[in-house]
Image (spheres, rainbow, N blue to C red):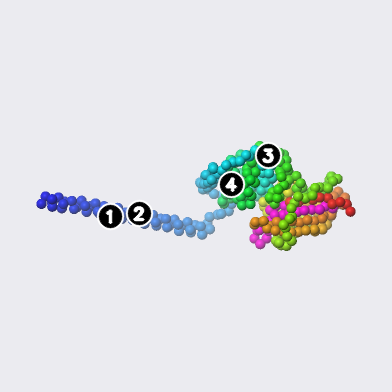
Amino acid sequence: MADLYSTSNSLPVFASGFEGKQDMKKQIRQHGITVAVVLGLLTVGAGAFVYSGIYNIGADDHHTKPVFAVLQALRDRSIQRRSEDIVVPNLEDPQLILKGAGQYAAMCTGCHLKPGMKDSEIRPGLYPQPPNLSRLQVDPREAFWVIKHGIKMSAMPAWGGSHDDATIWSMVAFLQKLPAMTPSQYKDIVARAPADDDMQMEGEAGPSHEHEHAAGVSNGSPAPESPLNLTGLTPGAVPRAEAVAQALGEALQRGDRDAVLALLAAEVTASESGHVESRESYAAGHLGADIEFMKGASLTPIFIGSGMQGEFAVVGRESDIHTSVDGRPESLRSVERLRLRRVGASWKIVAIEWQSRRLPSP
């Protein structure tokens, strides 16, 4: 009887424990349902917010400070983590630095400026604002990774798609020297930069990349043969891009500044008078000289051809220009190479190179 009595007394305790477990499971299930409902509502709310178009995606409407701080931390930590194991080569090689100078002048000054350059036409409208690399010392590992891979949701492209690692390292090597350069030192090193095909396509200037016809040829000897390479370009390959090149020449001849500028992309570079100019610099200076030189000139077309290089079109033209300089008749052989990118159904010029040499008198 004692055993039976003891067992009977334990039944309420067992039942109470069972009921407690059931209540706990019920509470967990209720909490799970609540969490699921909240997540569902958040998802629906986020979707409604996105599709409503309420958020202003314009670059001139900046993030709030907390949002910007989070995005900045995300960017910096992502770059640091992915670049920490990169092995840095010898960046003191003078030839590597020299090559990097030309690459930087061709591709980077519009956003990242150069010594003595306060601003560019495109830079004020970029958000986030690109750093002024002429005043900032950068970590070589991080610089290499950023140049090669770019940064999402910014104006920084991934140059690794069109440039090999050796070329990117040349830019990194140059960036280590850039902050200490004066404007005259920068101009000198860019003028001495090697003239390889890749740099020419981007519109850099080297020692023989002078647009001499803008100011006339003042010495008594012919300029050297143009290094611009038009090999591989085929007449009519990209007809709309060729039409833009023709329109540029016609606008210069008739002195139509607005028409010239309408054909140029915001990031255009012009290789003229031994150095690379931004759109803003060209518009303020050499454009006027070009228009003045071409006023009343007659052109004899020799060749026009085009081709594709990745997503860009390349157009090359060769012409004889007959005009007068300071009252003297002048005949020049002009070679022009343009790089264009597609904008809708048309093309915009992103790089211009000119080279001219005097033709012998008849």
The Cα atoms of the two marked residues, 2 and 4, are separated by 45 Å
Q: Earlier in the sequence, mark 2 or mark 4?
A: 2
Q: Earlier in the sequence, mark 2 or mark 3?
A: 2
Q: Which image quarter: residue 174?
A: top right
Question: What is the secondary structure assignment of the residue under circle 4?
Answer: helix
Amino acid bearing label 3: Pro
Q: Earlier in the sequence, mark 2 or mark 1?
A: 1
The Cα atoms of the two marked residues, 2 and 3, are separated by 67 Å
Amino acid bearing label 1: Gln
The Cα atoms of the two marked residues, 4 and 1, are separated by 57 Å
Question: What is the secondary structure assignment of the residue under circle 2?
Answer: helix
Question: What is the secondary structure assignment of the residue under circle 1?
Answer: helix
**Residue contact between numbered discs 2 and 3, judged by CB atoms under 8 Å:** no
The residue tagged 3 is 94
- Across and down, in percent, residue 95 comes to 68, 41
- Across and down, in percent, residue 230 comes to 74, 55
The residue tagged 2 is 31
Q: Name the side, left or right, on which 265 lies relative to 332.
A: left
Q: Residue at x 84, y 52 (%)?
A: 359
Select label 4 or label 3 by which is in front: 3
**Nearer the observer, 268 or 306:** 306
Q: Residue at x 77, y 50 (%)?
A: 226
Q: Earlier in the sequence, mark 3 or mark 1?
A: 1
* In magenta stretch: residue 214: no
Magenta-drawn segment? 331-352
The residue tagged 4 is 146
Q: Residue at x 67, y 44 (%)?
A: 100
Amino acid bearing label 2: His
The residue tagged 1 is 22
- Across and down, in percent, residue 29 comes to 33, 56
Q: Earlier in the sequence, mark 4 or mark 3?
A: 3
The Cα atoms of the two marked residues, 3 and 1, are separated by 78 Å
